[in-house]
Amino acid sequence: MTAALRERPPAANAPALTPTLRVAGRRWLFWILAGAAAILVSVAAALVAGGSTAGGTPLAADNAAEAGSRALVEVLRSHGVSVVAADTLEEARSAARAAADPTVFFSDAEDYLDATRLAEMAALAPRTVLADPHFAVLQALAPEVAFGGVSGSESPAAGCDLPAAVKAGELSPGGNTLTLVGPEGPAALTGCFPADGDRFGLIERRQDDRTLTLLVDDSWLSNGSIDTFGNAALALNLLGQGDTVVWYLPTLADLADTGPPSLGELTPVWVTPTLLLLALTAVASFLWRGRRFGPLVAENLPVTVRAGETMEGRARLYARGDARLHAIDALRMGATLRLATRLGLPRTVGVDEVVLAVAEITGRTTEEVGAVLVDAIPANDRELVDLAGRLADLEHAAGRQAAPPPHGRMSP
Amino acid sequence: MALTGRFVALVALGALPIVLLGRTVPEALGVLGVWLGLVLALGLLDLSLAASPRSLALERDLPGRVRLGETVTSSLALTNTGRRALHGVVRDAWQPSAGAGNNRTPVAIPPGERRVVSLLLTPFRRGERRALHVTVRSIGPLGLWARQATLGAPGRIRVLPPFTARAHLPSRLTRLKELDGRTSLLVRGQGTEFDSLREYVRGDDVRSIDWRATARRNDVMVRTWRPERDRRVVIVIDTGRTSAARVDDEPRLDTAFEAALLLAALASRAGDRVDFVAWDRRVRGRVHGAQGAELLSRMVDAMALIEPELIEVDWSAVPGQVRAVTSQRALVVILTSVDAAGAATGLLSVLPELTRRHTVLVASVTDPALAEAAGERGNREQVYRAAAAERAILDIGRVSAAIRQLGADVVTGSPAAVPPALADRYIALKAAGRL
């Protein structure tokens, strides 16, 4: 409720406890600067270290990490071979068309291309080098070739008259092998770097005027091991024959569009932005409802101690210790005192006289009253409860019979 | 800074242009961005146009005291010293037990003008209740964003004991008046004073006929008596450990205050001089030499700030405290708790010293739940509880007997019964002339 009052002389402003923006900024300056510095340092560290970490796409032309192939690509370029990286079949096709004498380098670790597209890829250039071919790739492009298992540990020697293989001499050891199976087709097949007989590290398939070179181990081309054994010589001689290398590593974009339209295509265009807006609205409403209306006011509250706690505690002690005799004693003493007062006996009277008086007034035998008031010993809890009930009964009966006690003005 | 619900609604309203104008995803995202920018710009504009909540002069108008359970109006005058009209909400930050309720008051103060925000306070705890600051939220002209500041504006109000026992006062005063001018209906003790002579009327005690005066006049004259006056009553309240215990959801200390106030009101009307000491190991409150209405107001003032201390009472110093108040014979009323014999040794040890010089009355609150528990004997747990309760009642009886043996008197009862019982005992003592 507000009410206008008459004009008064201007008073001094009340002291503000909330710091102004400037003061708050100064107070938090250190932490703001520290946070900014931490972010800057981590970003810089990521930038510096980013190139050398063992991440990125294996065999990628621009990947300087262990698994990448930037070293090979750079050496090819310095030898005058232009290398064009392609992410999709379309790009690879246009790159191959643009070149006079293209070589296609292809590796599809994720199995993105289907058989038709593999065939299209293989038809792009007169020379195609396949690294780490998959089963599906072999099926589509070189049905006579199959996997031959893991080879031994010795470095394979060329073992064929392929110029690139001969120049390479030896390759780094280990890895998979390929083997020749099935009927002889129209293609001419040459196996190089043999391991125990008919298993090879490299197979060249020549059909019509197209050469398909299958390199079973892609690590020969990676930055990490290109400079060991004859790996570099093999790679450079295989890929450096033409004027252009189309470095084609398929990506998600190569997947064929098939099946019903996805959920994303069915939703209206405004759904995502509206969801974003909703999230922002939620944030705004948090700020709206969550903003505290000034600091809390503290108050010291008193301890709450119930007066009955000691009584409850003693009752639990009695119960835990099965102190039946203690318990019934307390009840009896209380009852005897009350009965004595009720019957007008002096406070100092003995319990026997109380028993006699109670027996007289209730018409019960002295033995019965004596047992309840003095003698009976409860052997178990049932007897205790029973005895306590009888004690209450006796008190009740005596109270009914006895005349109400005289009310003295001074008696408490 | 704070947002308003209107701003949130405005942000949500952005869904409309997004649905209507966004034909592709990037376009819809663009619309979203534009909308957010627009809304933010509006908010910032609103914020810059809002009046500063810091340019306010505050002035409190508070009653100094309130009885517990009563309602007072706390006024806060706000003067806008800035150049813009302030629209907003004001929160007067009282402690929770000041009973201010949901104190958000909308205000509109034109520049240079002054408005009063009134708040009804119904405190629900005794003691001093404080307001520490005032928070002002100044909302911009568009009602989107608000500036907020907390201004220091301390205020305090003293919440006095409720003195609900004053309901018993009229009946006790009537009984006190009956003592006045009475012929010797009761035995005339040392403490009754000769008042006046008057003519005999039928029904007067023939033993009170003053024969000498009858001889001087032609009528039969009787002497009348009135209770002694100008006696000392010293009320000692124990504020130690046991006074914190709650009986019937009221701390023992509060019941002791009620009883002390009723006794003080009664005794001061009866012409006695009342002094009050609250003691545990040091004096927590003291009223000395006050008379009439001033006595009660000073007592409630002193009581308002006293809280139970969780320490053992130093009884050995109590006779010294009483001596410091008066060297005359007095009625010493000790409001404490009478429970186990072990806890009462301190009190029992100093009682002889007190009873030698003074009439001593010990008043204590007993828990009515004890008698209730002692009567329930349905099952095993209840029987053990009944036994424990009976034991506690016996202990109280034993300590009471010990106190009586030392020459003091005892008043016990439930929290509601103790104040009138104490007043009755005082009247009885006065009638018997034992003060």
Image (cartoon, coloured by chain):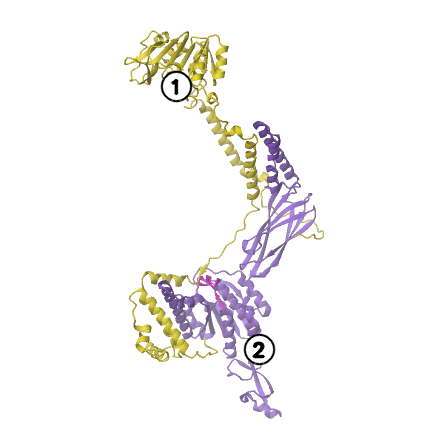
Chain colours: A yellow, B purple
**In the image, residue B354 above or below residue B83:** below
Name the amino acid, label 1.
Answer: Ala
Q: Quadrant of residue A199?
A: top left
Q: Estimate the x, y position of residue A138 in percent, counting from the top left.
A: 38, 16
Which residue has dot 2 on it?
B177
**Chain at numbered mark 2:** B
Of residues A136 and B138, the one nearer the viewer is A136
Q: Quadrant of the C terminus of chain A?
A: bottom left
Q: Estimate the x, y position of residue A91 in percent, counting from the top left.
A: 49, 16
Spatial CA span between label 1 and label 2: 119 Å
Check if mark 1 and mark 2 are on a common chain: no
Q: Is residue B243 magenta?
A: yes
Q: State which region is magenta.
A: B235-249
Q: Estimate the x, y position of residue A384 in percent, counting from the top left.
A: 32, 67
Which residue has dot 1 on it?
A136
Number of dots carrying numbers: 2
